[in-house]
Amino acid sequence: MANYEIHEHDILVIGAGGAGLRAAIEASAKGVSVGLVCKSLLGKAHTVMAEGGIAAALANVDSRDNWEVHFRDTMIGGKMLNNWRMAQIHAQEAPECVRELEQWGAVFDRTKEGKILQRAFGGHTYKRLCHVGDRTGLELIRTLQDKGVHQGIDVYMECTVTKILKDGDKVSGAFGYFREDGRYVLFKAKAIILATGGVGRSYLVTSNSWEYTGDGHALAYDAGADLIDMEFVQFHPTGMVWPPGVRGILVTEAVRGEGGILRNSKGERFMFKYLPEATRADYAADETEAKKWLEDTLSGRLKTEYKRPPELSTRDNVARAIYTEVKEGRGTEHGGVYLDISYQNAERVKKKLPSMYHQFKELADVDITQTPMEVGPTMHYIMGGIRVNADTAETRVPGLFAAGECSGGMHGSNRLGGNSLSDLIVFGRRAGRGAVDYTHKLGSAPQISESQITEAIEELEIPFKRQDGINPNDLVKELHTIMGTYVGIFREEKDLQTGIEKLEELKKKFKLVKANGTKVFNPGWHLCRDLKNMLISSEAIARSALSRKESRGAHSRLDYPKTDDSLGNENTSVSKDGETMKLEKTPLNKMPDDLKELFAKKEPAHA
């Protein structure tokens, strides 16, 4: 039996991004022992890449805004497939959570009156995104990290959790290893909060960092939780397309929120022709009308009566439009379109978008104050995730909670920009409270059997025992090809079926992956484990996409191009059934009448 460290906490939080930090802070503040595990170094969570802002109906810029409008925008953006209770909690509690960040030292951009400044974003009726230039996620992590460290939370850095341990049906702890030298570690815990982020590394072109291999999704799946809405993968419309080494890196929506214009290689401002009929009236109909909104924005008027420009349509719509322009031969030299903000005053651009200015200058040798950016869709976010209780963030596994991108339900079929950061702090806080309440009611601590630990260690060591085997890097390349070719922005049945067949073949090859050398500084060994998680989330995406025979939000079927109202009242759910993945359709909870009435209101839909 290999040696392993043992650490014991009331609550273990896996993931140290916005949701994990906020959950740990909340639980620690209530007097319980909290351990915080992060796959990378503390402060390097992928949350720092969320640049544009935090969506919260503070009404600092436009007094017409309130939680009801934010709730309605979120539900409409998600094509009504959202967990309505999560969307309600999110809209109601986001302002309080943002003010809390402010009290803890977050430095937001300000109005002339000293209030938190808010900007326009796609799908939001009013200017709602609280921001720090285009470095909002970085400021969020800095603030939460500072608060958490001073609260005395125990942090375990560069540590990967590979298995959730259970006592009967209840969570009892987690097993993993430290990435630096491969030493094993056992965490005993009464409750576990998963806050591991997304699944983007299953795709080649992605804005996601290396940590995003679907760890939380797979840990929960293996532990007996179910995953919902996995077919809904958001391709952010604007990622860098050149040079190849930085392809996919995010170009924040804040560029368009500050007046950035999308044009194809012919110089045409193409988004006017891609506005869906249902929302066309909310946007400017032509260049002349769009110019009025822009003039108000550039003049410093915070509240504008004019309709927002078409570039601020929802992300799913803009991504499909760019993809179509490129596919039909109107793309740029490097396979994207132009995003132009160079017509504005250079100093304003540098002030409002400092990260974008430096990103393009340093990575692509492009001065965005002088020339347009080349951008294209990049896999950015997954709306699907672990099914949780809206009020407590608990999964169907007692003692297992989830928050942030690894949880599902909040965003429905398409997330609005800025709702991710507010999602993190609202439901991170909820998860922390829920886990504390659970531990208080639990009574005696659950037990961990030695057989579970033995099984976890054997799984980690198998790749070293194979004399002949497959390099995991080769299988990751195959996975990227499968997901990009058969489970991308546009889907159809024959492609999805082919993709699933190829994933099944890849799963067989995975059983032959081999690691060389020792456990010390061994990225090949790490990838052997990460690949298992990536295959689980990829199969869930493909099978869920095949089962949804309609187009809705970020799920676009070429063979079923219309939205089917009869399918708008059910989630796709996948769960583990022995060695197979079981797929079910589960009904949405019924929305109360008082919330339904909000969708009948006729309010101005101007940004």
Image (cartoon, rainbow, N blue to C red):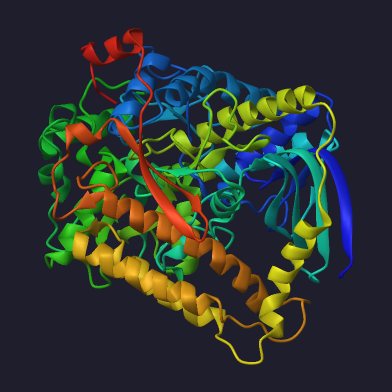
- Image position, residue 206 (x, y; %): 43, 61
Nearest to the observer: residue 583 or residue 3:
583
Question: Which residue appears at 49% of the width and 82% of the height?
Answer: 474
- Image position, residue 78 (x, y; %): 32, 34
Residue 336 in sight in this render: no
Figure quadrant of residue 553:
top left
Placement of 530 over or under 400, stated as above or below: below
Question: Which residue appears at 17% of the width and 46% of the height?
Answer: 271
Nearest to the observer: residue 593 or residue 206:
593
Question: Which residue appears at 23% of the width and 66% of the height?
Answer: 495
Placement of 581 over or under 495, stated as above or below: above
| The furthest residue to the bottom | 468
Is 81 left or right of 249, judged from the image as shown? Answer: left
Can you say which quadrant of the picture contains the C terminus? top left
Can you say which quadrant of the picture contains the N terminus? bottom right
Figure quadrant of residue 573:
top left
- Image position, residue 88 (x, y; %): 44, 20
Nearest to the observer: residue 546 or residue 241:
546
Question: Which residue appears at 35% of the width and 73% of the height?
Answer: 502
Is 593 left or right of 37, judged from the image as shown? Answer: left
Residue 399 in sight in this render: yes
Nearest to the observer: residue 425 or residue 140:
425
| The furthest residue to the top | 594
Placement of 105 over or under 375, stated as above or below: above
